[in-house]
């Protein structure tokens, strides 16, 4: 009887782990440092399902977040290259060549290409 | 008679105090100078305008580096380095205007924690953002005809002001922690008055040309002079 209860408890405890495996998807991440002059990075990485463009770049390079424009979760630095309001230099993100992406919210799909570019914005 | 005598003594005492006070403020140390750049002078940067050019013009000359005919540099910030007693009442409220798709003046001195006004004199909206380093401090939109907005900064140093709608628009507010700051005029000249006496370091800062520090000796009742010529320009900066 005691053995039976123990077995049921163990099964209940283990179930969530079996039901939610840590699935990953392949995406390509490109980082272009532009006027910062550092060599670019292009890597195929595996990210957890539900990851965002911001999550993806953080798997290959250190990032810092803060308020650059509109949101406290924005990237303000990638690999030590920070946004520079005095020089009008910012990090922008494209997903599969489109700027219609929320770096903090858009969930990536397998095969997506995430590009982060450091640009000087004059218009 | 005794009362009259006492009043005379008191009046004399007050006059002596006022003379001392006037003397220390008028005859304090002063510093003058001219900031230049060596030739050949950089060509002014022209920014083509691709939006709202009906009001902003087809192009604008960048305000980042304004050089006079003999190399005089405008908008250079000159300040004493050190901790100084600040005054409570600092007079008028500085104004940063948005006019003709530019922030004017391009460099505005504002005492730390002192209110200043931002106006919009253009017939269009602007999106004002202020940054200290890479950190955004404030952001607000101003429609055409909006009343001036009052702000103040607890931070010190150069604070970048930008318009999020017209990306070429930018200016600097220099949030000054003490009164001994000034900005060069169109002749590259500056003047600081009512300075303390002694040996000091003077910081010269320009947004493109950079920062340099010089030693000066400030003497009572005399003008000291500090002229400086920038010799290089980092053309990589835009």
Image (cartoon, coloured by chain):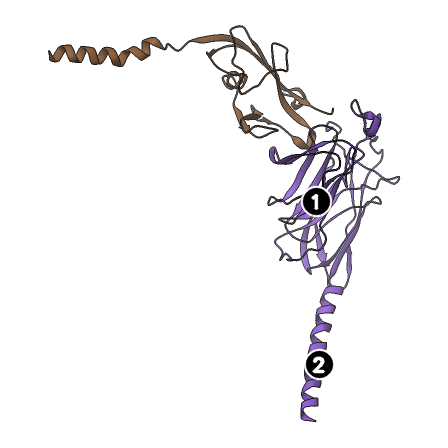
Chain colours: A brown, B purple
Q: Secondary structure at mark 1?
A: strand
Looking at the picture, tell me which residue is in the foreground, A65 or A79. Answer: A65
Q: Secondary structure at mark 2?
A: helix
| Residue B195 shows up from this direction | yes
Residue neighbourhood size for the residue with mark 2, other residues' Cα within 10 Å, grouped as few (<14), some (14–19), many (≥20) = few
Q: Which residue is rendered at x = 47% and y = 14% of the image? A: A50
Residue B61 at x, y percent in the picture:
82, 31
Q: In the figure, residue A8 lies in which quadrant?
A: top left
The correct choice, above or below, for B144 with respect to B4 in the image is above
Residue B43 at x, y percent in the picture:
84, 30
Q: Residue furthest left?
A: A1
Distance, label 2 to label 1, CA atoms, is: 43 Å
| Left or right placement of residue B219 versus residue A93 in this view | right
Q: In the figure, residue A76 lies in which quadrant?
A: top right
Residue neighbourhood size for the residue with mark 1, other residues' Cα within 10 Å, grouped as few (<14), some (14–19), many (≥20) = some
Mark nearer the viewer, 2 or 1: 1
Chain ID, mark 1: B
Residue that badge 2 annotates: B11
Residue B11 at x, y percent in the picture:
71, 81
Residue that badge 1 annotates: B117
Q: Residue furthest right?
A: B69
* Position of the C terminus of chain B by quadrant: top right
Q: Earlier in the sequence, mark 2 or mark 1?
A: 2
Q: Which residue is rendered at x = 68% and y = 55% of the image? A: B90
Tally of marks: 2
The correct choice, above or below, for A87 with respect to B87 in the image is above
| Residue B132 shows up from this direction | no
Q: Residue furthest bottom?
A: B1
Q: Which residue is rendered at x = 81% and y = 34% of the image? A: B100
Are marks 2 and 1 in one subunit? yes
* Position of the N terminus of chain B by quadrant: bottom right
Chain ID, mark 2: B
């Amino acid at each position: 009887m005691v053995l039976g209860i123990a077995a049921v408890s163990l099964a209940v405890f283990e179930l969530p782990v079996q039901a939610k495996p840590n699935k990953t998807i392949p995406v390509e991440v490109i980082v272009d440092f532009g006027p910062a002059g550092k060599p670019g990075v292009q890597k195929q990485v595996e990210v957890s399902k539900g990851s965002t463009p911001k999550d993806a770049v953080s798997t290959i390079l250190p990032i810092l977040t803060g308020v650059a424009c509109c949101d406290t979760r924005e990237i303000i630095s990638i690999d030590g290259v920070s946004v520079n309001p005095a020089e009008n230099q910012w990090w922008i993100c494209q997903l599969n060549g489109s700027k219609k992406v929320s770096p903090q919210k858009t969930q990536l799909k397998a095969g997506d290409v995430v590009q982060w570019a450091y640009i000087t914005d004059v218009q | 008679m005794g009362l009259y005598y006492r009043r005379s003594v008191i009046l004399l005492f007050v006059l002596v105090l006022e003379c001392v006070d006037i003397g220390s403020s008028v005859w304090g140390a002063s510093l003058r100078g001219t900031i230049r750049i060596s030739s050949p002078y950089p060509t002014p940067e022209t920014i083509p305008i691709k939006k709202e050019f009906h009001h902003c013009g087809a192009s604008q000359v960048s305000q980042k580096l304004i050089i006079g005919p003999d190399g005089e540099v405008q908008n250079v910030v000159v300040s004493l380095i050190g901790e100084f007693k600040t005054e409570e009442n600092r007079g008028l409220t500085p104004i940063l205007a948005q006019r003709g798709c530019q922030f004017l003046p391009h460099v505005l001195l504002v005492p730390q924690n002192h209110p200043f006004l931002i106006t919009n004199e253009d017939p269009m909206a602007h999106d004002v953002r202020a940054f200290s380093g890479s950190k955004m401090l404030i952001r607000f939109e101003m429609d055409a005809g909006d009343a001036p907005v009052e702000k103040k900064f607890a931070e010190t140093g150069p604070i970048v002001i930008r318009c999020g709608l017209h990306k070429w628009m930018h200016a600097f507010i220099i949030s000054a922690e003490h009164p001994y700051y000034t900005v060069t005029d169109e002749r590259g000249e500056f003047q600081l008055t009512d300075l303390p006496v002694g040996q000091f370091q003077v910081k010269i800062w320009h947004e493109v040309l950079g920062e340099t520090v010089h030693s000066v000796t400030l003497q009572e009742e005399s003008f000291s002079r500090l002229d400086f010529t920038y010799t290089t320009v980092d053309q990589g900066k835009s």
